[in-house]
Image (tube, rainbow, N blue to C red):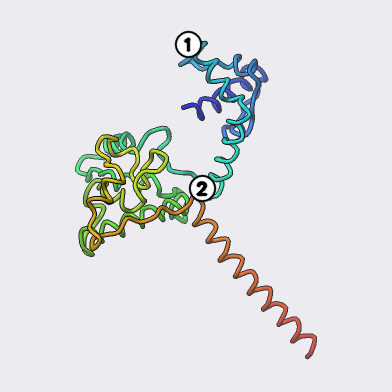
Amino acid sequence: MHYEGRVDAVVKYFAHECNMLLKKQLARRVHLTRSMYMKAVPSWCNNKIPCYQQIISRWINPEWRVTHRACSEWRALMGGPVHLQGNLNLHAYVQKKNRERGEGEQPLNSFMGLCLSRTSKKPEGGWVNPGAGSRIKAYSGKFKECNGPDSDPASQDIDVMVSLMSGEGKKGGRLYVGDGAIRKKDIPKLAHLRATTSSSGPAIERRPQPGLDMLHQFEVYFALLIFLVARLQEQNKLRQEA
């Protein structure tokens, strides 16, 4: 809310004070002063100005800006949007999609909703970002490991235990797969999971670092580039000798 609230305030300020329509993509990179933010009070804070002033204090804090910039850089490594859920969590997104489905259509469960919200709308298809595909692949693999090779993760809602094992529990308060579809009180602690997991059973996987898939792609592209350059140099040398 704090993040999108700041972006909305920037858009509102430029619309009202500068008569300019600023797209959100650009507004995310613009920072205002306290007085400018005060000219763009959001509707949900009209009667809570002291509260809004405290929020502004955070937005203009230099330490917050450093953190914000670092998170933006990590976010850029994803190579695409996080999901297509808008401002809905996964549970609310699944409910919305089920209301939109026609009579006789199979209702979505949380895993199907997860896949749908991470599927790109571009003509070539694929996932919205490489990390989304990696998470779904990690969950699907762990689901089959827990339930048998012929089991289908799309046959049921996201299994909290499988989600925990596929991404090293919760980190930063979030599950690796299915966060927003499982009630917080239903999520056991990682320490409890480790204590109750047999050494002969499915292992608890380490969570990949953000951007790891993108970095791997860069390494592959770089290696391919080196190969092509060497091949081109070899061909040029043969032409000169001919």
Total label count?
2
Q: What residue do we see at 55% from left, 26% from top?
A: 6
- Please indicate whether residue 144 sits to the left or right of residue 3 in the image: left
Residue furthest to the bottom? 242
Q: Nearer the viewer, mark 1 or mark 2?
A: 1
Tell which of 16 and 190 is nearer to you. Answer: 190
Is 221 above or below relative to 212? below
**For the residue carrying disc 2, how many other residues have a C-alpha within 10 Å: few (<14), some (14-19), or many (20+)?**
some
Is 9 above or below relative to 214? above
**Mark 1 secondary-structure assignment:** loop
Q: What residue do we see at 58% from left, 25% from top?
A: 59
* Residue labelled with disc 2: 80
**Three-letter residue code for mark 1:** Lys
* Residue labelled with disc 1: 48
Residue furthest to the right? 240
The answer for how far apart the CA atoms under marks 1 and 2 are is 36 Å
Is 138 above or below relative to 220? above
State the mark number for residue 88: none
Q: What residue do we see at 25% from left, 61% from top?
A: 199
**Mark 2 secondary-structure assignment:** loop
Q: Which image quadrant is residue 141 in?
A: bottom left
Q: What residue do we see at 55% from left, 28% from top?
A: 7
Is 21 above or below relative to 84? above
Tell which of 141 and 187 is nearer to you. Answer: 187
The x, y position of residue 149, in whole percent, is 23, 64
Q: Which image quadrant is residue 74 in?
A: top right
Residue contact between numbered discs 1 and 2, judged by CB atoms under 8 Å: no
The x, y position of residue 242, in whole percent, is 78, 91
Tell which of 232 and 21 is nearer to you. Answer: 232
The x, y position of residue 54, in whole percent, is 53, 17
Residue furthest to the top? 47
**Three-letter residue code for mark 2:** Gly
